Amino acid sequence: MKKYISSWNLDKKIFFIITSLIYGISVIMLVFFTAFYINSFIRQSNNITKNQLSALASNYEKTLDDYHEFAIAMIIDDSIQEFLESTGRADNDYFNLVNNAKQTLLNAINMHSSMNYIAIISYNFNDMVYKGNITKIAKNFNQAYKTDYAESLFCYESGTMRMSFNDVYLGNGHNTLNIYFPVYSITKMIKETGLLCMIFETSLFDGLSENSITEFDSEVFMVDSDYVVVSSTDDSSIGTRFTYADRLDGDNANFRVLNNLYSYQKIGKWNYYLVSRIPLINMYRDNIIVVVLLFFMTVAITFFGLAICKKILKKTYEPLDYVVKEMKYAAEGKLDVRINMENVGTDFKQLAYGFNYMMKEINSLMEQVKLEQQQMNQIRFNALQSQIQPHFLYNTLDCIHWQAMAEGNKEISVLVKALAQYYRLCLSRGKDVIHLEQEMEHVKNYLIIQNIRYDNIIESDIRVDDSCRNILIPKITLQPLVENSIYHGIKVKEGKKGKLWITVEKIEDEVFITVSDNGTGMTEEAIQEMNNSISEYDKDFGYGIRNVNKRIEILFGKEYGIHYEKNDLGGVTVIIHLPCRVVMDYEEVLNCK
């Protein structure tokens, strides 16, 4: 596939890219807006459900608060307190106390039509008073209330009131709301004197099973502090433990599990939660028409956009096609081809200008390469010229050396030996690059020859950083500089005595060789002219200054070379800038064979 596409023309590739982008963007936008719409719809529906649950929780909270306040009113009633504070049947006024308590209980039943039974159980003596529909309460009330009270749950965040919802009293699935409230003495607050028991045949919890309070065929149920479902729109779930009890944290929130959206609301300060479960498919069902309509609109807009893009691309590509054809001619070797700026649009003028400029630069660079190749050939030719057979010269100089030694002429012996070593390095089997240590030995031999020749007019101070001894340097780089210092600085100096300083130091990955003298020097104008013309190649001088600089530039790059300065001693300082290399990157330039 990749190979097939790569063979297309540019306009076809651009159209393919634009088509892919439009389809991709259309799909992304369709998915994004669909997801946004559905999520927004779910969010709104969730807010509606949350508000409905909040309203329902408020109703439950009000009812439960009423029960709580009523229970408190009962336990602090004087008749109830006096009954529980008595000593039982041993009390002379016991029956009056019982009658008064029963009257209070009767008034309570008359106030609440849903109350089936109410009882006050004394802890001081084994007795109780009660009122209600006795025939409906199991005969074993004493045992039933103890068991149910022990299993009931605290239903208030800070209180002793407990509740249960079951059929322990009526049996046969007839559930009652059972409220238990410990009674404490008013005079002795820490003393628990009895227990208030109220049994309601109420629709408080059964109300959820009557009909759904929310949309989307949702299920609503109530769970207690043990996360047991005490009421639900689905009766089969009553009495079961809520599966996702660990997700009920805080007063209200929502979460998604198994394609269901759960919302919950805590009933005020009561230890009960109202939970709704809405299948997400019920929410999505109403959005299908909107999604389908959005899909067809996206497809229509996409095809319309592609048609327009195709026409625009055809018009846009025409000037580019002209540029491509001209480039094809250039690729065939017609380097004189140029693009007519009038035949391209405004947007492609810069491209056409760049192409024309590039062709001009290519021609210029080719001429420069030819020139540099000619210079390199000249350097190689000069090197070949210098490759005379050295054996005869070495043997002859060696004979002269030993003959001078035999005749006791030490000065001639030293001169001949230095000359032999000098020419040995000059020839050096055609190598153009040597180690700095070898170059330094060459300079020392040259200085020996010149001092013998000119009666020791040259004093030298050579200092080389040990880390630089093995770096590479073009052969016979220093000797022309030393020669210039002698002939144009020291030799013409009044008194004909002078000194040379040669220092080599390494700075990071670069090496700087400084050759200084205290000769007659040069004017600032002459130094400036020398630096400006140093890169001009002079083929007539095999190892002249310009030749040395050019060889450095060819071998290492134009950022390296020679620079002249005037020094404080009245002479001239020459700085040679080289890279710190031990092995060259290529051998072709090194060996002029």
Image: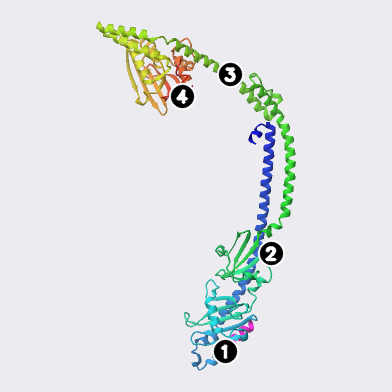
Question: How many marks are shown on the rendered structure?
Answer: 4
- Disc with the residue nearer the chain's start (3 vs 4): 3
Residue 247 seen by the camera = yes
Query: Which residue is tagged 4?
Result: 585
Query: Which residue is tagged 3?
Result: 364
In the image, residue 442 sits, relative to residue 225, either above or below, namely above
Q: Report how far apart the C-alphas of labels 1 and 3 lie in the structure.
A: 125 Å
- Residue 184 x, y percent position in the rendering: 50, 81
In the image, residue 198 sits, relative to residue 99, either above or below, namely above
Q: Is residue 572 left or right of residue 344?
A: left
Q: Report how far apart the C-alphas of labels 3 and 2 lie in the structure.
A: 83 Å
| SS state under label 1 | helix
> Can you tell which of label 2 and label 1 is closer to the viewer?
2
Q: Report how far apart the C-alphas of labels 3 and 4 lie in the structure.
A: 27 Å
The quadrant holding residue 433 is top left
Query: Which residue is tagged 1?
Result: 100
Quadrant of image for the N terminus: top right
- Magenta segment, principal secondary structure? helix
Based on the picture, tell me whether residue 430 belongs to the magenta stretch: no
Looking at the rendering, the stretch of residues picked out in magenta corresponds to 98-111
